[in-house]
């Protein structure tokens, strides 16, 4: 028998069925791929939100809890001889009346990098154990000195080895062992969906920050209630703040999560 007589091709019906089955398989694979890609993007956004929220709260907590830090002692018992470092300015904030608009917070504190006094040759000179512990000290820098009973801020007018000269005479002699550190002011704001520390972005995706201040109204050094503006609390005001409650909203693509923490001020804790 002629072999060409026995050859058969696909019929139109068979071809259409094959194409339909192939199309179904392609659609199924596409659906699975799209679902996996969407799930991956969601998990990626979820991880990014968690990381931003964790970093934001960690950095905020580190600075806020040190508000008014003078190196030793407790703010309640220290006498501050300089108005730029006192209970009134240790912490401050700006509350936005619109719930969806972020607040801002500013803390003033001594740096954690510190050194100690060897002697004061004169009322305008401070000899230190080592200037290097403060980093590079230049003319115009503001430093904080404390003997755990008094604090005072002085501006550097000259540096000679480990001896610093103050632009103006200090109010008193500070004995050996008194601590010297940099005076730092740190401001946190939300700009362009970023949490910024002194203008530098530290966490992305932060769309809102609301802050409440725990005030002590009965002198037991524990918060009695939380206010958005303790400055209006007469007569105690900002010095009555003993803790800070921070609420952040972090958003990345389709994921939005709230983050919250309550921070006790180190120098005003019970």
Image (cartoon, helix red, strand yellow):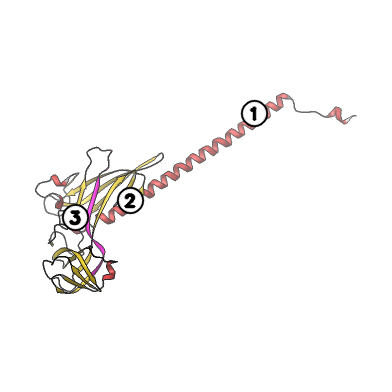
State left or right for residue 248 relative to residue 91: right
State left or right for residue 47 relative to residue 261: right
- Which residue is rendered at x = 64% and y = 28% of the image? 20
Image quarter in which the N terminus is found: top right
- Which residue is rendered at x = 54% and y = 37% of the image? 32
Q: Nearer the viewer, residue 246 or 63?
A: 63
Numbered mark located on residue 132 in the image: none
- Which residue is rendered at x = 11% and y = 68% of the image? 172
Query: Mark 1: which secondary structure?
Result: helix
Contact (Cβ within 8 Å) of mark 2 with mark 1: no
Image height of 137 relative to 9, above or below: below
- In x, y percent, where is residue 36? 51, 40
- Alpha carbons under labels 2 and 1: distance apart: 53 Å
Q: Mark 3 packing: few (<14 Cα in 10 Å), some, or many (20+)?
A: many
Q: Magenta residues: mostly which secondary structure?
A: strand
**3 or 2: tag closer to the N-terminus:** 2
- Residue on which disc 2 sits: 56
Q: Mark 1 packing: few (<14 Cα in 10 Å), some, or many (20+)?
A: few
- In x, y percent, where is residue 113? 27, 65
Residue lying furthest left: 235
Q: Nearer the viewer, residue 248 or 156?
A: 156
Query: Mark 2: which secondary structure?
Result: helix
- Numbered range of the magenta stretch: 100-115
Numbered mark located on residue 20 in the image: 1
- Residue on which disc 3 sits: 90
**Image quadrant in which you'd find residue 139:** bottom left
Query: Mark 3: which secondary structure?
Result: loop
């Amino acid at each position: 028998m002629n072999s060409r007589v026995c050859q058969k091709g696909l019929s139109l019906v068979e071809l259409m069925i094959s194409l339909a089955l192939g199309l179904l398989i392609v659609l199924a694979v596409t659906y699975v791929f799209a679902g996996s890609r969407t799930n991956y993007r969601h998990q990626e956004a979820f991880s990014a939100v968690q990381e931003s929220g964790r970093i934001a709260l960690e950095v905020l907590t580190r600075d806020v809890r040190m508000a008014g830090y003078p190196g030793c002692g407790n703010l309640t018992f220290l006498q501050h001889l300089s108005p730029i470092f006192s209970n009134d300015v240790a912490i401050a904030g700006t509350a936005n009346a619109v719930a969806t608009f972020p607040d801002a917070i500013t803390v003033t504190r001594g740096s954690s990098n510190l050194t100690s006094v060897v002697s004061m040759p004169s009322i305008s000179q401070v000899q230190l154990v080592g200037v290097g512990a403060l980093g590079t000290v230049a003319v115009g820098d503001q430093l904080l000195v404390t003997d755990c009973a008094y604090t005072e801020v002085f501006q550097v007018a000259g540096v000679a080895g480990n001896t610093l000269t103050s632009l103006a005479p200090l109010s008193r002699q500070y004995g050996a062992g008194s601590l010297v550190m940099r005076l730092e002011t740190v401001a946190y704001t939300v700009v362009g969906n970023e949490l910024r520390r002194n203008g530098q972005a530290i966490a992305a995706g932060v769309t809102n920050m609301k802050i409440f201040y725990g005030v002590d109204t009965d002198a037991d050094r524990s918060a009695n209630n939380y206010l958005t503006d303790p400055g209006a609390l007469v007569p105690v005001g900002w010095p009555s703040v003993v803790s800070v409650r921070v609420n952040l909203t972090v958003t990345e693509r389709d994921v939005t999560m709230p983050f919250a923490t309550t921070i006790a001020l180190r120098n005003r804790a019970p």
